[in-house]
Image (spheres, helix red, strand yellow):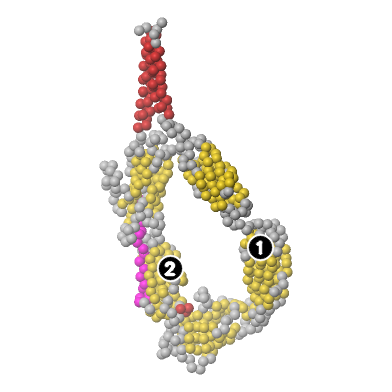
């Protein structure tokens, strides 16, 4: 063999060896996976007696084909070390697990949720320690990581609610009766509520953790003669806000009140305040009415008590009473309430429906402010007239009623005098005003308006919705959004693939736009759809994206009145345009080709007959 042949043989051997060495190096790189690292960043409890654990996972020496595959969560109702079965790397005792597919990043955040920790008995209230372990697809596992925040307490037991008073059901009560309940919970309390016949009457928020007895003074004059249901409900301070309640029934006895004539809230300064009442007590024929009194206070001063005049000769279980309070100076505020008791010592202090004293105000004659009620539709379609109405209740006569309105927010208000259409009786005079906006306004026009009234005594009333004005919006006839049905969409999308989306759009008015929206890794693009026939629209386009990119696709349509609808959102992960290759194996294929072709070429050269 001559020198030239030896050199060629040496080159051939080098060419043969280098691809093998490179191939084995890459293979060794693929299998050399390092253990993932895990850190617990947050632990919270949910309303459903579950623990939500947030972790950060990092795979050192990350490779596309090597990834974290499984996350295990371990819990224990003990303050001791829970890692009993984990010393031998036996991960069978986990409470929940989470499986991942291939990731395209070395470090990522995720969370894992525990099973429900309540068995319904409340006996599983406990401290739970939290531990996680991550395992890769090559069975490399992280260290066992325990939450550094200590133990999380899960309270599955509701509070305990016990009545102290009333101690028995159907206890007779009157006046102001103290409802008392003993309430305890292992995680303190957040809210206590007192109910009468389903109506919440009192609440205590965030009570003192040192307290276990909670009271409420029950004013029961509204339930005289009834047997109301009393309920006390308590929520604990756990994440699940466990609720418990207890109920009992009482019997409300004692006198009851009936106002024979309504007592006015506003009186002229030259008029008296007249009370005409009936007090009834049918609780027991052996019990008689004992006393009926009026308590009143002038301008928040000392309460004064006076006895009612008895108009009934034989006062036993029912009596009619009256009292006349002398005229008070202009601007006086009179607070008043009524007290009655019987010979058994049962009493009631009668107030208004909100359990506060009644209030009357003394004013100048004919200087009582008018009151008004505005009626209108907040929206009308553009083929309808907008109508506004005002009903004024006035002690004397309405001199002027102005409607002030504007069509554009930049315009000044126009003032329009309205004519009264109806007048009520002399003792309770009311006036009715109506105005129709007959002009046709554009769609989405907003009409702002308010009223101003002046009575014969010079009292002014402005009705302007608390300074915000009243608003009428002109709406289109069609208020229904289009209905989109996607009839054709690809099951998968590859990089560079031309795809076609076909939809039907049902719409009663004119469609202005039908578009395909697609998002690639957070960046949104649009494609106009082409009308095909009937209700069918179609669009074909190419999505420029890389293998593994996340893509979302949906269709949006809106009509001439801007009613807008979106279709269902389809989600894809871009497949490779070359299914047989991947970004990590392409070089391996090139080396294999070189490994076969180049040696064969050199061999043919060596075997060629020499001249």
Residue 164 within the segment the image draws in magenta: yes
Quarter of the picture holding the C terminus: top left
Residue 237 within the segment the image draws in magenta: no
Figure quadrant of residue 586? top left
Q: Which mark is residue 384?
A: 1
- The residue lying furthest to the top in this view is 611
Figure quadrant of residue 298? bottom right
Q: Is residue 203 visible?
A: yes
Q: Position of residue 458 (x, y in %)?
A: 71, 74
Is residue 520 toward the left or the right of residue 384 in the image? Answer: left
Q: Which mark is residue 193?
A: 2
Indicate whether 366 appears above or below 11: below
Figure quadrant of residue 89? top left
Q: Residue at x 39, y 10 (%)?
A: 608
Q: Position of residue 485 (x, y in %)?
A: 52, 49
State the SS at label 2. Answer: strand
State the extent of the magenta-drawn residues as a range: 150-168
């Amino acid at each position: 063999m001559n020198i030239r042949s030896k050199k060629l043989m040496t080159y051939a051997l080098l060419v043969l060896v280098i691809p093998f060495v490179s191939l084995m190096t890459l293979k060794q790189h693929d299998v050399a996976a390092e253990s993932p690292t895990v850190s617990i960043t947050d632990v919270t409890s949910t309303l459903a007696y579950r623990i939500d654990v947030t972790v950060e996972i990092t795979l050192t020496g990350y490779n596309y084909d090597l990834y974290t595959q499984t996350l295990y969560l371990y819990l224990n109702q003990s303050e001791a070390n829970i890692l009993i079965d984990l010393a031998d790397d036996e991960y069978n005792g986990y409470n929940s697990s989470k499986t991942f597919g291939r990731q395209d990043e070395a470090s990522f955040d995720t969370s894992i949720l525990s099973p429900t920790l309540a068995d319904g008995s409340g006996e599983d209230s406990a401290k739970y320690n939290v531990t996680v372990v991550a395992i890769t697809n090559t069975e490399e596992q992280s260290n066992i990581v325990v939450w550094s925040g200590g133990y999380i307490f899960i309270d599955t037991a509701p509070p305990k609610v016990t009545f102290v008073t009333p101690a028995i059901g159907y206890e007779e009560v009157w006046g102001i009766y103290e409802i008392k309940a003993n309430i305890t919970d292992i995680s303190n309390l957040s809210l206590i509520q007192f109910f009468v016949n389903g109506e919440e009457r009192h609440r205590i928020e965030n009570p003192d953790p040192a307290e276990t007895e909670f009271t409420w003074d029950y004013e029961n004059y509204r339930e005289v003669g009834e047997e109301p249901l009393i309920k006390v409900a308590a929520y604990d301070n756990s994440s699940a806000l466990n609720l418990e309640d207890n109920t009992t029934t009482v019997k409300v006895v004692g006198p009851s009140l009936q106002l024979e004539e309504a007592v006015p809230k506003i009186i002229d300064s030259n008029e008296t305040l007249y009370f005409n009442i009936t007090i009834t007590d049918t609780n027991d024929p052996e019990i008689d009415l004992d006393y009926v009194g009026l308590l009143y206070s002038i301008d928040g001063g000392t309460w004064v008590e006076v006895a009612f005049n008895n108009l009934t000769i034989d006062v036993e279980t029912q009596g009619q009473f009256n009292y006349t309070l002398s005229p008070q100076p202009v601007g006086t505020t009179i607070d008043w309430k009524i007290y009655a008791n019987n010979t058994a010592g049962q009493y009631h202090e009668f107030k208004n429906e909100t359990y506060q004293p009644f209030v009357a105000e003394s004013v100048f004659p004919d200087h009582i402010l008018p009151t008004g009620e505005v009626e209108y539709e907040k929206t009308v379609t553009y083929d309808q007239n907008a109508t506004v109405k005002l009903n004024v209740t006035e002690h004397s006569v309405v001199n002027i009623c102005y409607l002030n309105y504007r069509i554009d927010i930049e315009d000044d208000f126009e003032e329009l005098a309205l004519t009264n259409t109806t007048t009520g009786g002399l003792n309770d005079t009311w006036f009715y005003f109506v105005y129709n906006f007959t002009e046709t306004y554009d769609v989405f026009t907003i009409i702002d308006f308010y009223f101003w009234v002046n009575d014969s005594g010079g009292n002014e009333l402005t009705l302007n919705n608390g300074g915000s004005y009243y608003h009428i919006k002109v709406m289109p006839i069609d208020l229904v959004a289009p209905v989109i049905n996607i009839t054709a969409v690809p099951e998968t999308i590859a990089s560079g693939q031309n795809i076609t989306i076909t939809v039907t759009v049902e719409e009663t008015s004119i469609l202005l736009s039908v578009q395909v929206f697609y998002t690639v890794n957070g960046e949104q693009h649009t494609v106009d759809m082409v009308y095909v026939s009937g209700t069918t629209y179609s669009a074909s386009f190419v999505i420029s994206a890389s293998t593994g990119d996340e893509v979302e696709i949906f269709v949006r349509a809106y009509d001439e009145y801007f009613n807008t609808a979106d279709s269902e959102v389809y989600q894809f992960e871009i497949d490779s345009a070359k299914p047989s290759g991947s970004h990590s194996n392409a070089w391996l294929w090139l080396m294999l080709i070189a490994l076969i072709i180049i040696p064969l070429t050199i061999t043919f050269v060596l075997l060629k007959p020499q001249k």
